[in-house]
């Protein structure tokens, strides 16, 4: 009794609009979850929280990574995941710098003249704007040298 007849034109227009809306919503859903930034941040935090000089590695399954003093971003196929460090600030390290050498095992006293130089280089690295870089893994190293405690991430 209260049903609309099937021949009613507005019923077909409404059905077409509802179908188009459903297809549009389905097309905008992400195809894959964002990269696991929380796992990488947990590895950084475990090294940063250590009471001793420690080194850690974390493999990344993302195309690009951006590291800041308090946060990490990972990007893969247009999806971006991010996580905040619980034990920040950390020092993001760029390639071909003295900090990069320290990150990969060079003692800080060989890479820098004084602890003040080391501390200044770490502060300058933390002040830079984070940039996207391609990475296969994160290397994390906690270094202490005559009162200068730094967590290097690169």
Image (cartoon, rainbow, N blue to C red):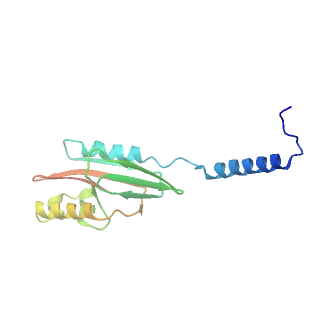
Q: Nearer the viewer, residue 121 or 137?
A: 121
Q: Nearer the viewer, residue 128 or 108?
A: 128
Which quadrant of the view contains residue 94? bottom left
Which quadrant of the view contains residue 125? bottom left
Return the x and y of residue 103 as percentages of the image width and height.
27, 57
The residue at 40%/54% (across/down) is 73
Q: Is residue 106 above or below residue 41?
A: below
Q: Is residue 47 above or below residue 145?
A: above
Direction top: furthest residue: 1
Badge count: 0
Direction right: furthest residue: 7
Q: Which image quarter holds the N terminus? A: top right
- Please give left or right for residue 78 compared with residue 154 in the image: right
The residue at 88%/40% (across/down) is 5
Q: Is residue 104 visible?
A: no
Return the x and y of residue 44 as percentages of the image width and height.
31, 47
Q: Nearer the viewer, residue 72 or 115?
A: 72
Return the x and y of residue 111 as percentages of the image width and height.
18, 64
Return the x and y of residue 91 as percentages of the image width and height.
26, 57
Q: Is residue 17 visible?
A: yes
The residue at 82%/48% (across/down) is 12
Q: Which image quarter holds the C terminus? A: bottom left
Direction front: furthest residue: 1
Direction bottom: furthest residue: 96
Which quadrant of the view contains residue 105? bottom left
């Amino acid at each position: 009794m209260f049903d609309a007849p099937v021949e009613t034109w507005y019923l077909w227009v409404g059905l077409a609009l509802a179908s188009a809306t459903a297809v549009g919503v389905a097309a905008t859903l992400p195809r894959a979850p964002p990269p696991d930034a929380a796992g990488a941040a947990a590895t950084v935090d475990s090294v940063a929280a250590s009471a001793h000089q420690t080194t850690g590695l974390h493999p990344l399954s993302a195309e690009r990574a951006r590291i800041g003093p308090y946060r990490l971003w990972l990007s893969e196929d247009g999806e971006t995941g991010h996580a905040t460090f619980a034990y920040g600030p950390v020092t993001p390290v760029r390639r071909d710098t003295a900090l990069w050498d320290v990150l990969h095992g060079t003692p800080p006293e060989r890479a820098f003249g004084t602890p003040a130089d080391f501390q200044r280089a770490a502060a300058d690295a933390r002040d830079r704007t984070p940039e996207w870089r391609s990475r296969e893994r994160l290397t994390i190293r906690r270094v202490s040298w005559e009162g200068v405690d730094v967590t290097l991430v690169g």
